[in-house]
Amino acid sequence: MHLRKPKSFTIDRSKWVQGKYQANGVLLGFSELLNEKDNMCCLGFYSEACGVPRSELQGCFSPKELEDCHVPYMVLNDCSSSFASDLMQLNDNSDCSKYKYVHKRDKEKLLKEKFKLIDVKVKFVGRYPEGVI
């Protein structure tokens, strides 16, 4: 499958799943490219903008799991690139990373800065679901 790096992509806050975040005590689903609740992590939004069909994104935790879809800048020698790994840790506030205590608005700023490194602009739209921590 031929994928292209987009010039920009949009993350809808109402559909953005970020690790352990919950709304009104209800888990928004696992942080996957596209989960069973139709929510996506930042790499899901990026992968879709690159041209990966939603049906391929379903249930995958990282772009390296996508068969025949080499998402630009995300996979290196069948492993997640260091760039992708860093984005996953930031998206999920991984307990073992430097992003453990990053607030959601700071996370947006950091994601914009990181994607700018590969000349991709990120736009955030919508509102966080009620009760998102």
Image (cartoon, helix red, strand yellow):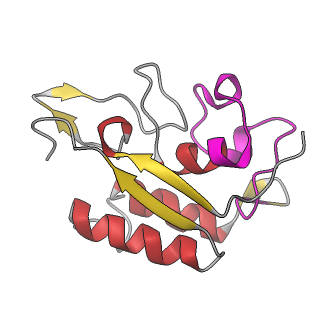
Seen in the picture, residue 105 relative to 129 is either above or below; the reply is: below
Of 5 and 72, the residue lying toward us:
5
Q: Is residue 49 left or right of residue 45?
A: right
Q: Quadrant of residue 126?
A: top left
* Number of callouts: 0
User: Does residue 51 show up magenta in the picture?
Assistant: yes
Residue 73 placement, left or right of 113:
right
| Residue depicted at 73% across the width and 65% down the height | 73
Q: Is residue 57 magenta?
A: yes
**Residue drawn at 35 percent across, 72 percent down:** 109
Residue 122 is left or right of residue 27, and the answer is right
Residue at image coords 30%, 30%: 28
Q: Position of residue 94 (x, y in %)?
A: 36, 58
Q: Is residue 102 visible?
A: no
**Residue 125 point in image, percent of width and height:** 34, 49
Q: Residue at x 80, y 54 (%)?
A: 4
**In the image shown, does 1 or 26 lie closer to the viewer?**
1
Q: Position of residue 10 (x, y in %)?
A: 48, 51
Query: Does residue 90 lie above or below 55 as drawn?
Result: below
Q: Is residue 126 above or below residue 67?
A: below
Location of the N terminus by quadrant is top right
Q: Which residues are magenta?
A: 48-75
**130 with respect to 63 (left or right):** left
Residue 114 appears in view:
yes
Query: Residue 35, how many percent across, how many down?
Result: 48, 27
User: Principal SS element in the magenta part?
Assistant: loop
